[in-house]
Image (tube, rainbow, N blue to C red):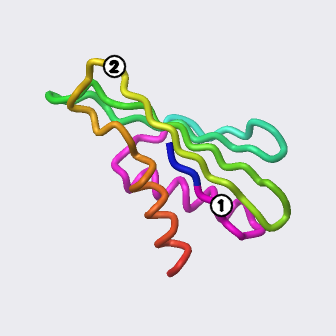
Amino acid sequence: MGTMNISIKAVVVILILVILAVSEADLAIESVNKVDDKTWMIMAKKSTSAWSWGEIVRVTVINLNTNQTEVKVYTEKRSSINVTAKGDYSTPILTNIELKLKS
């Protein structure tokens, strides 16, 4: 799991950056849902292949206050015996968001 705190007022900007970062991590976005007034959840997956049963990735975007947004990335293997699965997408997703914020 990885976590990032971002100082941007517009949550919609963070949501767009998260969706782009997830897509660029070669994950298929399954859903984007507003959980409550402050929380969004993005569900994505890495499909099965000849070498892996795939992974499931959940990204939560939480508006902590008017100037702070938190992004959390959770990755799960579809099976605990799936030794060829990448295992953790938090670093590429969070790094990609950070690079996009700098540009």
Q: Give the label on residue 5, or none.
A: 1
Q: Residues within 10 Å of mark 1 (few under 14, many from 20)?
A: some
Picture coordinates of residue 100 (x, y %)?
50, 72
Where is residue 84, by image quadrant?
A: top left
Callout 2 crowding tier (Cα within 10 Å): few <14, some 14–19, many ≥20: few
Instruction: Identify the magenta region.
Output: 4-29
| Residue farthest left in this picture | 50
Q: Is residue 52 left or right of residue 60?
A: left
Residue type marked 2: Ser
Query: Looking at the image, which residue is at 51% across and 48% down?
Result: 2
Mark toward the start of the polypeptide (2 vs 1): 1
Q: Quickly name the residue at label 2.
A: 80
- The percent position of residue 94, horizontal first and vertical second, equals 49, 58
Q: Which mark is residue 20?
A: none
Q: Residue 13, image x and y in percent?
A: 66, 65
Classify 70 as above or below 51: below
Tag 2 secondary structure: loop
Q: Secondary structure at mark 1?
A: strand
Question: Is-magenta flag for residue 19?
Answer: yes
Marks 1 and 2: in contact by CB < 8 Å?
Answer: no
Residue type indicated by callout 1: Asn
Tell me if 17 is positioned left or right of 75 in this view. Answer: right
Q: Which residue sits at x=44%, y=63%?
A: 95
The residue shown at (56%, 43%) is: 59
User: How many marks on residues?
Assistant: 2
Q: Depth check: 18 or 7 in front? A: 7
- The residue located at (72%, 70%) in the rendering is 8
Alpha carbon separation for disc pair 2 and 1: 30 Å
Residue 23 sits inside the magenta stretch = yes
In the depicted structure, whether residue 65 falls above or below residue 29:
below
